[in-house]
Amino acid sequence: MNKVVMTFLDRLAERFIALAAGLLSSRIAGLHAAAQAEQQSELEDLARRYDAEGKPEIAATLRQRLLGLPSTNLALEGAEQIRQLQPSVPGLPESLVTGPTGVAAELRDVQDSQAPADGDRFQRIELDAAGVVAVNPPFHIQARDRELLLALAQKVRLFSQRQVADHFWDGALANARRRMKQLAKRELVARITVQARTAPPLESPLASWRPGDSIPEFGRVAYRCHERWRQRPVRPCAAWIATEQAAQLFGGVRRGTLTHPTQATHDLGVAAVWLRLRQVAPPWATAWRGEDLFAEARRGEKLPDAFLVDQAGQVAWVIEFGGGYDAERVAAFHADCADRGLPYQLW
């Protein structure tokens, strides 16, 4: 009798182990497939971006990688392939490099900070009496996440939900919301609601000036500033800002809150200018240094919305979003830049 019972229990154990092994195997396969699908989607997004930028050889190489479907991290391999295909010294556009020599000393050492690389895994960190402690499971930072978080930490103060969807997810609002919620769960971004006007389409600057050029017609520039806001009422707007956690990781100014919520319309306009440069002149977007980076060093001085800084640390352009400026304010902005010998673009 005991022998029969033992045999029964042995067979039952064998079946249970086989069932558990099968479930575990299926779970691992599912996780692997999901991760691979996410990496494949990321590489396809990169390929489309390079197609749009007129770099079909890079896009073709990325898609060739997709055909092989290796088991290693596709995103990391794709990023490495891009680095190999990019020019060794990308530099800035010629119009930036040869700009006037107006220099702000505090800009010389400003560079994009060391941030998590594409494909890195991130753990939320907290500081306590014992030091830095990781408290969350690893989180995969994609190339798109890195670019967005770096922009919010160093270049602009906020993006609207629509700006995020249109410029980082090709208009896929649901996908953008889903990913931003995941970033918010890791305390990298925070969702806020602001009262703001929708930024008008920004194709090119309203005024562009360099030392030696004729003075712009301030009244005409101001008229265009005012005219573009017609029939654009103030409305509640969902927006995203970087958190203090993101600032720690990406080296930007501490966020977590919007210091001047009444300026949300202006800040969204500044973000729209950066997004436009990212679209038509990516090196200019990389050279962008937001005003908050220099607020402490230049207390009491007028600060434009951004500087474009070349590799030598020289200010190649000053960027200002004109909002609804009147002629007097346009003239004051011009006078400040002219006194310092700085070229500018007023959007």
Image (cartoon, grey):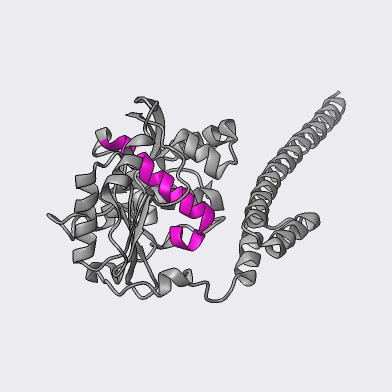
Give the image location of residue 274, x and y in percent.
42, 51
Residues in magenta? 263-285
Residue depicted at x 66% and y 45%: 38
**Is 48 on the left or on the right of 297, as rendered?**
right
* Observer-nearest of 133 and 65: 65
Residue depicted at x 69% and y 41%: 34
Dominant SS in magenta = helix
Name the residue at the left extreme.
300
Specify whether residue 172 is in view: yes
Residue depicted at x 64% and y 70%: 85
**Is 213 on the left or on the right of 24, as rendered?**
left
Q: Is residue 53 above or below residue 86?
A: above
Residue depicted at x 27% and y 71%: 102
On whether residue 255 falls in the magenta region, the answer is no
For the N terminus, the image quarter is top right
Give the image location of residue 91, x and y in percent.
48, 72
> Residue 114 occupies which quadrant of the picture?
bottom left
Specify whether residue 242 is in view: no
**Is 161 on the left or on the right of 171, as rendered?**
left
* Observer-nearest of 76 and 29: 76
Give the image location of residue 269, x and y in percent.
37, 42
Give the image location of residue 149, x and y in percent.
44, 48
On whether residue 266 falls in the magenta region, the answer is yes
The mark total stands at 0
**Is 227 on the left or on the right of 86, as rendered?**
left
* Observer-nearest of 264 and 217: 217
* Observer-nearest of 118 and 258: 258
